[in-house]
Image (tube, helix red, strand yellow):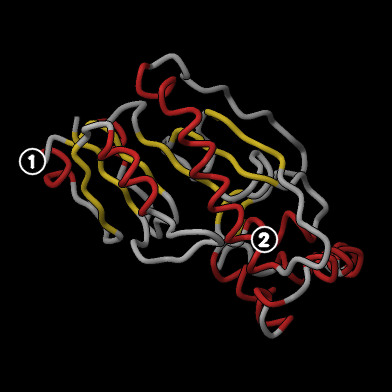
Amino acid sequence: MNILILGPLNQTTAQNKRLEPLIKFLSKKNYRTYQSNEKISFNFIKNKSIKMIICSGYPHIINKTIISLVKNRIINLHPAYLPHGKGVGALAFSLIKNHPIGITIHYIDKNVDTGKIIAQKLVNPRLNENFRSFYLRLLDELNKLFFEEFKKIISGKNKGKKQKKINNSDFYTRRRSEIIYEFFGNTYDINVSDLKNFSKGYLMNEIFFDTFKKL
């Protein structure tokens, strides 16, 4: 089986690289892997006979035609606990809005971060951990969870569960996330506890940030 892995190849995590463990894991199981962080085409998927796609940090939305071609075999490794935290910068907003924190592996459907959930895990930040180190640790946790679930995924036994409908579900755009980063100067280096302490002030003035939802 040919498997395409989408995401940044050289991004460093807390313990490794973001995609390297995935590529090694699949190669040891004799799957042929391809990797890209560029926007992929229908012809590429068809010509390479791609039967499964794994996304981790992929910046592009996958075409609906490709989703139909590789039906129920496109998986996203998402560093947030769905159905909370859809979109870009989801972890920061989940912390600020006191939502459940963790990781989710889900199937990709025609919308963003709305597909059936394969597996998820609650992961709490450590004492005095900053946002950057926490985020990078979640990327390693995502890989571990994928390894644990892979056998069920590849066999078709784990078909996923529909996401629960919640009243405070939200979707975050890249621009909306940048507003938060700009507000703090550098969100990645802020202590997680300080980010959570910002919660009350944010929620009281959320209408200001909501202005940027559609940007």
- Residue 152 position by quadrant: top left
Q: How packed is label 2: few (under 14 Cα within 10 Å), some, or many (20 or more)?
A: many
Residue 47 is situated, as x and y percent measured from the top left of the image, at: 8, 41
Q: Front-most of 10 and 37? A: 10
Quadrant of the snapshot with the N terminus: top left
Q: Residue furthest top?
A: 157
- Residue 108 position by quadrant: top left
Q: Front-most of 128 and 169? A: 128
Residue 161 is situated, as x and y percent measured from the top left of the image, at: 57, 22
Q: Front-most of 154 and 59? A: 154
Residue 44 is situated, as x and y percent measured from the top left of the image, at: 13, 47
C-alpha distance separating marks 2 and 1: 39 Å
Whichever of labels 2 and 1 marks the residue nearer the N terminus, that label is: 1
Q: Which residue is drawn at the image coordinates 66% and 77% (left, top)?
A: 181
**Which numbered mark, 2 or 1, is in the foreground of this view?**
2
Q: Which residue is drawn at the image coordinates 30% and 38% (left, top)?
A: 26
Q: Which residue is drawn at the image coordinates 67% and 61% (left, top)?
A: 134
Q: How packed is label 1: few (under 14 Cα within 10 Å), some, or many (20 or more)?
A: few
Quadrant of the snapshot with the C terminus: bottom right
Which structural element holds mark 1?
A: helix
At label 1, which amino acid type do we have?
Answer: Asn
Disc assigned to residue 47 = 1
Q: Is residue 70 above or below residue 139?
A: above
Residue 182 is situated, as x and y percent measured from the top left of the image, at: 66, 82
Disc assigned to residue 110 = none
Q: Front-most of 132 and 93? A: 132
* Apparent side of residue 96 relative to residue 161 in the rendered image (left or right): right
Which structural element holds mark 2?
A: helix
At label 2, which amino acid type do we have?
Answer: Phe
User: Which residue lies under the disc numbered 2?
Assistant: 134
